[in-house]
Image (tube, rainbow, N blue to C red):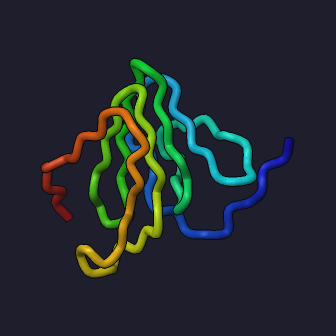
Amino acid sequence: MAREQVDTAPAGTVLSKRGKVTATRAGQDARILKRGDPIYTDDVVSTVRGANLQLRMKDRNIVMLRGGSSFRVGQYQPDAQLGDVKRFDYAGGELRPSRRSLSS
């Protein structure tokens, strides 16, 4: 089945992963993610039990998911004021925020 081209800019990319990790958009087939793949607004990212995922978002934040987790990348606007935009919808599983600071 052919996939539709995504015409929006990526909200982030897969930094690292272990195990099966997928991204799904409404009306499209699930895509299996690998290192370097883009993540877009409205993607639902899911990990199977035993899998791990790290995403680097465009605002340089790191999102880490453990196995059996999923979340939806919502209205992603990296330049918005803090608290103005809900960026993720947590669907379940274990989500761990990174407190690591990234240097330029």
User: Of all residues shown, which one is farthest toward the top?
Assistant: 50
User: Of all residues shown, which one is farthest toward the front?
Assistant: 91
Residue appearing at x 46%, y 57% in the figure: 73
Where in the figure is residue 81, as x and y percent of width and height?
26, 81
Judged left or right of residue 61, residue 52 is: right
Q: What quarter of the picture does the N terminus occupy?
A: top right
Residue appearing at x 45%, y 39% in the figure: 70
Judged left or right of residue 100, residue 53 is: right
Residue appearing at x 14%, y 49% in the figure: 100
41 up-or-down from 29: above or below: below
- Which is nearer the eye, 96 or 16? 96
Where in the figure is residue 84, as x and y percent of width and height?
31, 78
Q: What quarter of the picture does the C terminus occupy?
A: bottom left
77 up-or-down from 65: above or below: below
Where in the figure is residue 44, as x and y percent of width and height?
53, 47
37 up-or-down from 83: above or below: above
Quarter-of-image position of residue 79: bottom left
For the image shown, how many numbered marks are present on the structure?
A: 0
Residue appearing at x 56%, y 37% in the figure: 22
Where in the figure is residue 25, as x and y percent of width and height?
64, 52
Judged left or right of residue 57, residue 13 is: right
